[in-house]
Amino acid sequence: MTQPAIFFGHGSPMNALGGPYVAAWRELGEAIGKPKGVVMISAHWETRGLGVTAQARPETIHDFGGFGPELHAMQYPAPGSPDLARRVSELTRAHAVETWGLDHGTWSVLVHVWPDADVPVVQLSLDRTLSARQHYELARALNPLRDEGIVIAGSGDFVHNLRTWKRTGDDGPYPWAVSFNEAVKAAFARGDHAALIDWVDLAEDAQLSVPTDEHYLPLLYVAAQARPGDEVSFFNDEITGGSISMTSVRIG
């Protein structure tokens, strides 16, 4: 069965414990059912050279600080898949990695999508030697996996500016954050992947929304999976703290 491609706006690690975005993640998992596996590209695994997690039992990585013990104690014991890692390597020439696991960009979301942790998950790293266009072209090589029962997923945020994030007294999103968020959605909806790749020209003050691109690049991996006739839909379409977008995309 052909599987969709999903971009998750993951926001704060605290979303792993619950909150307003969880219902849509759970509904998504129920709608998809149990795929054969997931290939996740997370904002939180950057490398020089391309890596893919290859262990059978990846650890739950708590790659953050300043949060309470309940969050640090959380585990997401989803299996890995050495076979899926090998298949990803065949398609992308990624090298097998056993020194990483599932970071919070992956498990803080999937703990709600597949709460039984019974869907195999591998992570593909963000190779920092590549341009945005090269990331997109690399991602296209993953497309056959959709027909092999694999969900291609990205986890980041359309808009991610922690320096301007309002920790208290949130009185709504910044206008520039709304403008960029809407421009990304519009490009997805019309299938304008060239605009997504050249994101600096998408909207005025784009670089306020994307001061560093690690949270943006995973969405290119999802856009690259689109096929003619695929429906594009959005969920959790909200900006929190003024400058963190939770907007998520489903293709197919």
Image (cartoon, grey):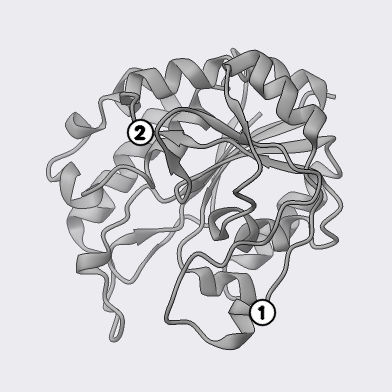
Q: Position of residue 45 (x, y in %)?
A: 48, 46
Amino acid identity at mark 1: Ala
Which structural element holds mark 1?
loop
Residue found at x 60% / y 49%: 100
Q: Position of residue 149 (x, y in %)?
A: 81, 28
Nearer to me, 60 or 187: 60
- The N terminus: image quadrant: top right
For disc 1, the marked residue is 73
* Label 2: how many Cα within 10 Å (few below 14, some 14–19, many 20+): some
Q: What residue occupies the far front of the structure in this picture?
A: 99
Q: Is residue 191 visible?
A: no
Residue found at x 78% / y 23%: 2
Which structural element holds mark 2?
loop
Q: Is residue 164 left or right of residue 83?
A: left
Q: Position of residue 195 (x, y in %)?
A: 30, 24
Q: Quadrant of residue 92?
A: top right
Q: What residue occupies the far left of the structure in this picture?
A: 204
Q: Position of residue 38 (x, y in %)?
A: 72, 38
For disc 2, the marked residue is 128
Nearer to me, 8 or 124: 124
* Label 1: how many Cα within 10 Å (few below 14, some 14–19, many 20+): few
Q: Is residue 94 left or right of residue 46?
A: right
